[in-house]
Amino acid sequence: MANPKPLVQATGRRKSSVARVRLYEGTGVYVLNGRTLDNYFQDPELRRRAHEAFKITELEGRYDVHASLHGGGTTGQSDALRLGIARGLIAIDPELRPALKKDGLLTRDDRRVEPKKYGLRKARRAPQFTKR
């Protein structure tokens, strides 16, 4: 099935995940790496995050989402998808920006895993102390 030209393309990132999102006029269908939303994200919380931008702007069912997700795990990918969708919606209608910004959907979550330090077991966890 050849898709028409996308309305907008946007990118979302979180941790080491990247989501390249394309929005089309449609009925609310999600295609993520060739799979449906329910098939791609098993956890209902991750699916809820993906829908969040549409729910806030009350545009559920108006656009189809085709996204290419790679890197990281499921949580990072769902948050990257959420950011990509929010950015795409703003490109379509800039007046949606205040509503999305108020709920923090336009801010990239820049938290990373803290690197492990030498002499420690993890980033901060020291080896168990032995007296003898």
Image (cartoon, rainbow, N blue to C red):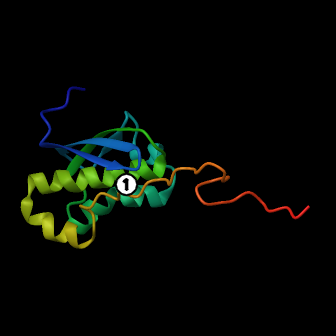
Q: Farthest bottom residue?
A: 102
The relative height of residue 3 versus residue 72 in the rendered view (above or below) is above
Residue 16 falls in which quadrant of the image?
Answer: top left
**As rendered, which of 63 and 124 lies closer to the eye?**
124
Image height of 99 relative to 126, above or below: below
Q: Is residue 54 left or right of residue 45?
A: left
Residue 62 can be seen, yes or no: no
**Residue picked out by circle 1:** 79
From the viewer's perspective, tell me whether residue 61 is left or right of residue 94: right
Q: Residue furthest front?
A: 132
Q: Is residue 6 visible?
A: yes
* Residue 100: quarter of image: bottom left
Nearer the observer, 62 or 87: 87
Say what amino acid the circle numbered 1 marks: Asp
Q: Position of residue 129 (x, y in %)?
A: 80, 62
- Residue at the (63%, 53%) spot, across then down: 122
In this view, the residue in front, 27 or 21, is 21
- Residue 88: x %, y % from top left: 18, 50
Q: Name which residue lies at 14% across and 70% down.
A: 98
**Could you tell me which quadrant the N terminus lies in?**
top left
x then y, percent, for residue 117: 58, 51
| Residue lying at 27% horizontally and 71% vertically, measured from the top left | 103
In terms of secondary structure, where does tag 1 sit?
A: helix
Neighbourhood count class around disc 1 (C-alpha, 10 Å): few under 14, some 14–19, many 20 upward: many
The quarter of the rendered structure image containing the C terminus is bottom right
